[in-house]
Image (spheres, grey):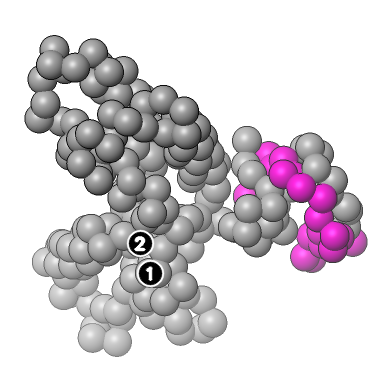
């Protein structure tokens, strides 16, 4: 996509797609901030935003008034992206070892996030070993020990309560594990419920966090 194509999309169908992208980014931002665990990286959405930013970033808006409109919209996107990334980085800092040792969670990281998580964990382990772990017996130096059935790896609290809204009717009843609670969700319904009970609905796009 070149700059002429971007300018052509400022009207009509292009505006509709831009609105959809903004809505999708806003929803990803709200959901990431509300969910206790890291969610999948929206690679296609981020690629579209990067393409427009690269094409428009080095062009003087005085040469074309429509560029001012595009750049104004880009600033809205940039604000959301920065906040979105800060939220994800905070989760990576807190649960780096869990994310790196769990294949399902590792797949949710972007390539840059995976590199950051690996570097973060390596620095943390090096600091711990230099500070105090080296003074312990070898059998007690592991940071991923599961002796006694208790894991040392800190995991997200998937039973944290979240506000969720159904985007469409959910055919199967929602069951909250460990309780006798089950309920049905219809489009527009809002509930406060454990994240673990509605995680799959949110990831599949049947519901959203608010």
Q: Position of residue 53 (x, y in %)?
A: 22, 36
Q: Quadrant of residue 22?
A: top left
Q: Which residue shows up at 31% across the image and 60% down it?
A: 110
Q: Which residue shows up at 13% across the image and 12% down it?
A: 62
Which region shows up in magenta? 158-180
Q: Which residue shows up at 16% across the image and 75% down it?
A: 134
- Secondary structure found at label 2: loop
| Towards the viewer: 59 or 99 | 59
| Prevailing secondary structure of the magenta residues | loop
Question: Is 152 drawn above or below residue 110 in the view shown?
Answer: below
Q: Quadrant of residue 204?
A: bottom right
- Is 155 on the left-hand or right-hand side of 69? right
Q: Position of residue 57 (x, y in %)?
A: 15, 31
Q: Is residue 164 magenta?
A: yes
Residue wearing tag 1: 106
Q: What quarter of the picture does the C terminus occupy?
A: top right
Q: Is residue 159 magenta?
A: yes
């Amino acid at each position: 996509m070149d700059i002429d194509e971007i300018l052509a999309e400022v009207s009509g169908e292009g505006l509709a797609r831009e609105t959809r992208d903004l809505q999708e980014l806003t929803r990803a931002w709200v959901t990431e901030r509300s969910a206790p665990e890291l969610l999948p990286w929206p690679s296609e959405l981020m690629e579209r935003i990067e393409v427009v930013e690269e094409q428009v970033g080095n062009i003087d808006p005085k040469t074309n008034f429509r560029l001012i409109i595009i750049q104004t919209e880009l600033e809205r996107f940039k604000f959301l992206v920065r906040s979105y990334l800060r939220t994800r980085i905070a989760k990576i800092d807190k649960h780096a070892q869990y994310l790196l040792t769990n294949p399902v969670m590792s797949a949710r990281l972007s390539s840059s996030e995976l590199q950051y998580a690996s570097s973060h964990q390596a620095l943390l382990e090096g600091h711990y070993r230099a500070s105090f772990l080296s003074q312990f017996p070898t059998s007690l130096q592991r940071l991923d020990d599961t002796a006694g059935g208790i894991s040392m790896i800190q995991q997200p609290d998937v039973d944290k309560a979240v506000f969720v809204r159904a985007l469409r009717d959910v055919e199967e009843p929602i069951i909250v594990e460990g309780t006798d609670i089950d309920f049905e969700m219809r489009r527009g319904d809002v509930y406060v419920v454990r994240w673990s009970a509605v995680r799959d609905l949110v990831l599949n796009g049947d519901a959203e966090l608010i």
